[in-house]
């Protein structure tokens, strides 16, 4: 991968510009609902960005459903099969990807019900959440946020990666969760999210982000 070109940006400009990009994104399978990945470690704040985008899309008349992967973790008996601090299990064994396919993506397929389950499992109580399904109108947007979203063949129409350098990730991750850091190193090595994602946002300094939105001819550029 070549050297990436980063453009400094404010969140006040970034969020509306990203909402504009989402609003102009079509679906790869001919469906009517756009599926967006907000991929990043919890320390990068993908959940915060999802909330801000949902509000911006609402102002533009585009309904959305926000779903976090934390609501689709596997039961503790499966997550902790190799111990409570196993980085490899955290990387490839904690998320219930089958449930995400079944409860989030499949209903948004052409001809699907259009109703999404916002969460399935509460990792604190280790019980099913029993949340009601949420309808997503035609033309609506799914905002799925969480770590390790790329590389599962999920049918995203737009992918956004929130990048942290290893030093920034360690600095902004609680010491009790430092055991997870090797999982993010492995993800970066195996999935190369910076080159895989359509848009990458650098969040080392949460108050001064920068982004990269493609280098190819004809690639999208936000309005000044």
Image: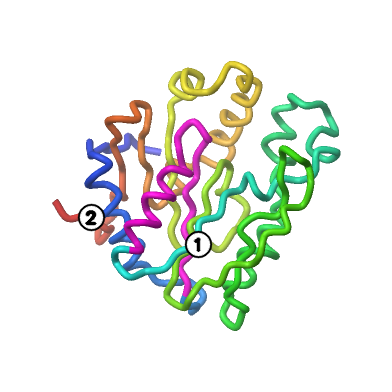
Above or below: residue 141 compared with residue 113:
above
Q: Which residue is mark 2?
A: 221
User: How many C-alpha atoms fall within 10 Å of the one at disc 1: few (<14), some, or many (≥20)?
Assistant: many
* Label 2 vs label 1, nearer the camera: 1
Q: Residue at x 61, y 48 (%)?
A: 69
Query: Which corner quadrant holds the N terminus?
Result: top left
Above or below: residue 200 compared with residue 184:
below
Q: Quadrant of residue 17?
A: bottom left
Question: Alpha carbon of mark 2 to alpha carbon of mark 1: how far?
Answer: 25 Å
The stretch of residues the image draws in magenta is 33-58
Q: Position of residue 213 (x, y in %)?
A: 31, 49
Q: Residue at x 58, y 36 (%)?
A: 187
Q: Position of residue 40 (x, y in %)?
A: 50, 40
Magenta span dominant secondary structure: helix
User: How many C-alpha atoms fall within 10 Å of the one at disc 2: few (<14), some, or many (≥20)?
Assistant: few
Q: Residue at x 70, y 28 (%)?
A: 87
Q: Left or right of 8: which side holds 89?
A: right
Viewer-side residue, 134 vs 199:
134
Q: Quadrant of residue 103?
A: bottom right
Query: Which residue occupies the extreme bottom position in the image?
Result: 111
Above or below: residue 105 compared with residue 75:
below
Q: Secondary structure at mark 1?
A: strand
Q: Which residue is mark 1?
A: 65
Q: Is residue 35 magenta?
A: yes
Q: Quadrant of residue 77?
A: top right
């Amino acid at each position: 991968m070549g050297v990436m070109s980063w453009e400094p940006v404010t969140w006040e400009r970034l969020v509306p510009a990203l909402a504009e990009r989402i609003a102009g994104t079509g679906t790869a399978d001919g469906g009517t609902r756009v599926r967006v990945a907000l991929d990043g470690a919890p320390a990068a704040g993908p959940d915060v960005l999802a909330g801000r985008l949902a509000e911006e899309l609402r102002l533009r008349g585009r309904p959305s459903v926000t779903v976090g992967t934390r609501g689709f973790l596997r039961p503790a008996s499966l997550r902790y099969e190799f111990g409570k601090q196993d980085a490899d299990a955290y990387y490839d064994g904690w998320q219930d990807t089958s449930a995400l396919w079944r409860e989030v993506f499949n209903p948004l397929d052409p001809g699907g019900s259009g109703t999404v389950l916002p969460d399935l499992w509460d990792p604190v109580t280790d019980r099913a959440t029993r949340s009601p399904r949420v309808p997503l109108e035609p033309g609506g947007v799914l905002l799925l946020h969480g770590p390790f979203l790329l590389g599962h063949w999920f049918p995203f129409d737009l992918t956004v990666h929130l990048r942290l350098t290893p030093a920034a990730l360690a600095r902004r991750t609680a010491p009790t969760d430092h055991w997870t850091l090797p999982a993010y190193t492995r993800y970066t090595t195996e999935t190369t999210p910076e080159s895989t994602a359509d848009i990458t946002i650098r969040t080392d300094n949460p108050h001064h982000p920068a982004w990269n939105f493609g280098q190819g001819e004809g690639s999208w550029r936000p309005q000044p």
